[in-house]
Image (spheres, helix red, strand yellow):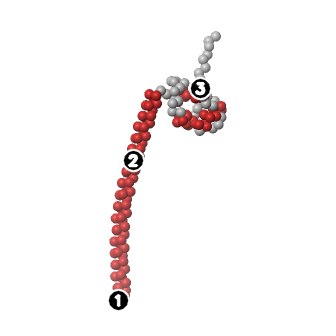
Amino acid sequence: MEKVIKKENAKERLLKFLLHLDIGQGKFEELVGISNGYINNNKGSIGSSVMDRISTRYPELNINWIATGNGDMLISSKEKHLNNSNESYYREKYIESLQNIISEKEETIKLQKDEIMKLKDEISRLNGIISKSSVREEKKEAS
């Protein structure tokens, strides 16, 4: 008879990580911000939003290992450094793009302010013409 090796599911790998941390399921759920009993009620796979919460709280955990079983449980310091470098790079690019958007909006606001001033001047000029015209008509009617 051939021996069948059962492959671990994500829930079982997560439980191994909890053993590594020497932490209970309830405390882990509280720290990660997931519902009490999530792990116990889990059928084997873990949703992406929960995976995001776990990776945020435990950046040393290899999320790929949790999901697939491939690789090591923990990310090496070299991989962690690369992840942090990439995160910093994308954060800087995001900030740079936001600064460009702000600069463009500030320029638009300046142009709109200039246009408003021109329109106000034109309104004042037209009001002056209307006032002079009204005075002339009143004089004609009076004579």
Disc 3 secondary structure class: helix
Q: Residue at x 38, y 54 (%)?
A: 106
> Is 75 situated above or below 137?
above
Residue drawn at 35 percent across, 85 percent down? 139
C-alpha separation, residue under disc 2 versus residue under disc 3: 44 Å
Secondary structure beneath dot 2 equals helix
Question: Which residue has dot 1 on it?
Answer: 143
**Which badge, 2 or 1, comes first in the chain's sequence?**
2
What crowding class fits label 2: few (fewer than 14 Cα within 10 Å), some (14-19), or many (20 or more)? few
The residues bearing labels 2 and 1 have C-alpha atoms spaced at a distance of 66 Å
Residue under pointer 3: 16
Which residue, as the protein is rendered here, is positioned at the far top? 1
Mark number for residue 99?
Answer: 2
- Residue at x 61% of width, y 16% of height: 4
Residue 141 visible to an observer of this rendering: yes
Three-letter code, disc 2: Gln
Q: Are marks 2 and 3 in contact (CB under 8 Å)?
A: no
Question: What number of labels is visible?
Answer: 3
Q: To which quarter of the image does residue 37 belong?
A: top right
Q: Nearer the viewer, residue 119 or 32?
A: 32
**Under tag 1, what secondary structure?**
loop
Front in this rendered view, residue 126 or 83: 83
Badge 3, how many Cα within 10 Å: few under 14, some, many 20+? some
Query: Nearest the camera: 70 or 137?
Result: 70
Front of the two marks 2 and 1 = 2
